[in-house]
Structure formats: structure tokens, C-alpha cells
Amino acid sequence: MRLSSDQTQAIRRVAQRVLGAEARVLLFGSMALDDRRGGDIDLFFETDAQLPNRAKTLCQLHGALILALGDRKIDLILKDANTPSAPIFEIAQRTGVLL
């Protein structure tokens, strides 16, 4: 994994602040692999809660992450209790690193 412990902690704090203490977040994609270079930060956020407005929540997560990590390319996917399964979720869960 190519994130520092400070970056990892900042991401976890954002997840807990926006989604609650039970939220899970995984880093996947090239940043999860030590032998790669470059790349954006791909994050999979998951909560068992039912979110009233997923789009608003994604915006809150993205804004808080930009403030915490700086202006970087960050891709987010979010799964709540109402979100149907999708191949990208399965890929993130299978290949991701729990933060």
C-alpha cells in the first residue's frame, strides 16, 4: 500500500465523521499495490446504514478528503444498505486493502 500512516488515518477519520463509526473503507487500484507508480487514490466506502442522499454523501466525503489530503485525484465509490451489488464493489472488496 502506497499511502502513509497519516494519510490512512485521515481517510479513516473522514469516513467515520461522514458515515459513522461502523463505516468501512478500502483502498484499491494501483495505490494498493507496492510495485506500482503513480495513480489516483481509489477508495471504496461501505456502510450498513441507509443513506437518504448518496450523491450528497459522496460530495461530503470528497470535499473532506480533499481538505485532509490536499488537491489530489481521488475516486470514490459508496455502497450503503440500499445500493444493489455491482461488479466494481466486488472488485474493490476482493483486491482492496482495509484502512
Image (cartoon, grey):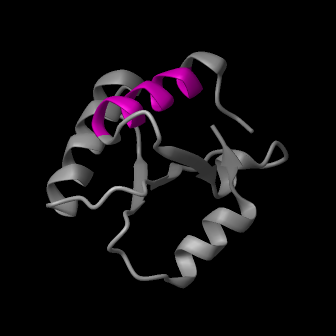
The percent coordinates of residue 32 (x first, y second) are 71, 47
Q: Is residue 53 left or right of residue 24?
A: left
As drawn, 65 above or below 48: above
Tell me the residue at 28%/25% (across/down): 67
View extreme (top): residue: 6
Position of the C terminus, as image quadrant, is top right
Within the image, what quadrant is residue 88 found in? bottom right
Of 57 and 20, the residue lying toward us: 20
12 horizontally vs 39: left or right:
left
Q: In the rendered view of the protein, which quadrant contains the N terminus?
A: top right
Taking 84 as reference, is 19 above or below it?
Answer: above
Give the image location of residue 86, x and y in percent: 49, 83
Name the residue: 15% across, 61% down: 53
Where residue 28 appears, as percent x and y from the top left, is: 63, 55
Q: Is residue 54 above or below residue 34?
A: below
Q: Within the image, what quadrant is residue 37 found in?
A: top right
Task: Tell me how many marks there are.
Answer: 0
Whether residue 56 sits left or right of residue 82 in the image: it is left
At x 22%, y 51%, the residue is 57
> Is residue 43 toward the left or the right of residue 15 in the image?
right
Q: Which residues are magenta?
A: 7-18
Q: Position of residue 97 (x, y in %)?
A: 71, 47
Q: Nearer the viewer, residue 84 or 27?
A: 84
Q: Main secondary structure of the magenta part?
A: helix
Residue depicted at 81% across the width and 42% down the height: 34
